[in-house]
Amino acid sequence: MNKKEVAHIRKQFKLDHDLMNIYDILNVYIMKESNEIYHWERLPFGLVDREKQELYMGNFKKLLTGELDHKLFELKFQEEAEDPTRVMLHQGLVTGDAEEWQDLMMLLVDKMLVDVKYEKDMVITFVRGQYYRPTKARNDEAEESGKDEMFAHPFILCSVNSTEQQRKNLMFDYVEREFKYNIIVDPIIKLSSPEQGFFYPSVTDNYSDVNRILYCTGKSNYPDPQFIEQVLNAERSVTALEERSFFEDIVKELAGEQLDTTTLAQVYEEIQQVIEDGAEEEEAPKLDYKDVERVLKVSGVENVTAEKVERAFETVVDDKYYEMKASSVIPKYTSKSIKIETKVATISVSPQDLRYVKQVNYQGKRCIMIEVDEEVVIEGFTLSTETL
């Protein structure tokens, strides 16, 4: 599943849209600590108040918002699992009976309550529906009408949301003409910030893939392993943060613990070029041991050989054929995504400008030197230039 496919699905979640039909919605309210199902209800989505529909649509779009391998993870189902979730979801996908779909989703809720203690009351929302997308090929009739042939994709979406108590407020009563202390005990369901959830089935080359599921987390780079393995019965995926750590450890194996900013900036530039060259491809560009060897050699790292890079891959990830997603291993290239922390100041710089920052030794002290093209102004005062 690539970012274009995710974006297409996310864009369909809007009201009065010809390319999206939501048939049923099931809400389950879970009490904290006791994990008791306090209440549940299923309704045809069309019977839900329009204002509520808009809130739900916003929640579903928010759930599907984020970068792949950061907040969204395409997962394979485990091959051997007792009462596999894959079977429940597939049955729920193909059944035309709303009661049967509801019963299957409630079985999934039961799995969510095993070995878990929620700190807040939770609301688990399921919807089932169908979205449409054009096929890659166009038929004769579509050519004549100027419209793409459309394929229907049934889906199930789950959104797990926490609740919070409303704040105490002072309100003004227009009728009584007096100020009143307002206490509302009903909790607010935080639809604007879902905790986690999933979209099933995933999509591969514009076709539904029932052997994979898109897991979504509200915390970037922190998927819930218990939810993935015990609830979804899926195989855990490597996060972008973990892949960056792999890359850093591989480079340290080959170049040592210390690099100057010129070399590091060149490494980032070479990898950014790989990302840009593969921007139009369906699959995100990846780096294998041969790519890492080339990047390090071009960047000026000495004594790098294919054999050494292979050994570094085996040492760090236990697989010399492992491929890392290029976009995962470097900070955001054009934004000030690198933070240099010192006790005096925190400096933010983009990878493309890292070459203008150096660590130097001045009178026996380590100093950060930044090359600038213009005068530096602090609180209206232009700094005088000192010659070292």
Image (spheres, helix red, strand yellow):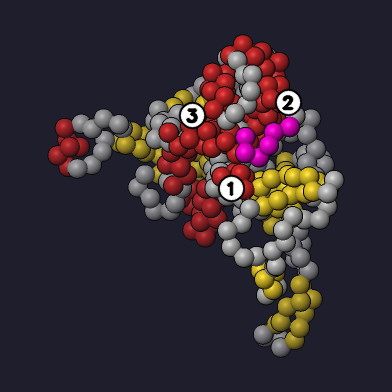
Tag 1: residue type? Asp
Mark earlier in primary sequence (2, 1): 2
Q: In terms of secondary structure, where does tag 1 sit?
A: helix
Residue range in magenta is 258-263
Q: Quadrant of residue 157?
A: top right
Look at 59% across and 26% down and name the residue there.
Answer: 296
Look at 43% across and 33% down and name the residue there.
Answer: 277
> Which residue ends up furthest to the right in the rendered image?
364
Q: Is residue 382 above or below residue 172?
A: above
**Distance CA(mark 1)–CA(mark 3):** 23 Å
Q: Which mark is residue 353?
A: 1
Callout 1–callout 3 Cβ contact below 8 Å = no
User: Where does the C terminus fall, quadrant-wise?
Assistant: bottom right
Look at 31% across and 32% down and name the residue there.
Answer: 135
Look at 66% across and 40% down and name the residue there.
Answer: 261
The x and y percentages for residue 138 are 23, 32
| Label 1 CA crowd tier, 10 Å (few <14, some 14–19, many 20+) | some
Mark 3 sits on what residue? 285
In this view, the residue in front, 378 or 141, is: 378
| Label 3 CA crowd tier, 10 Å (few <14, some 14–19, many 20+) | some
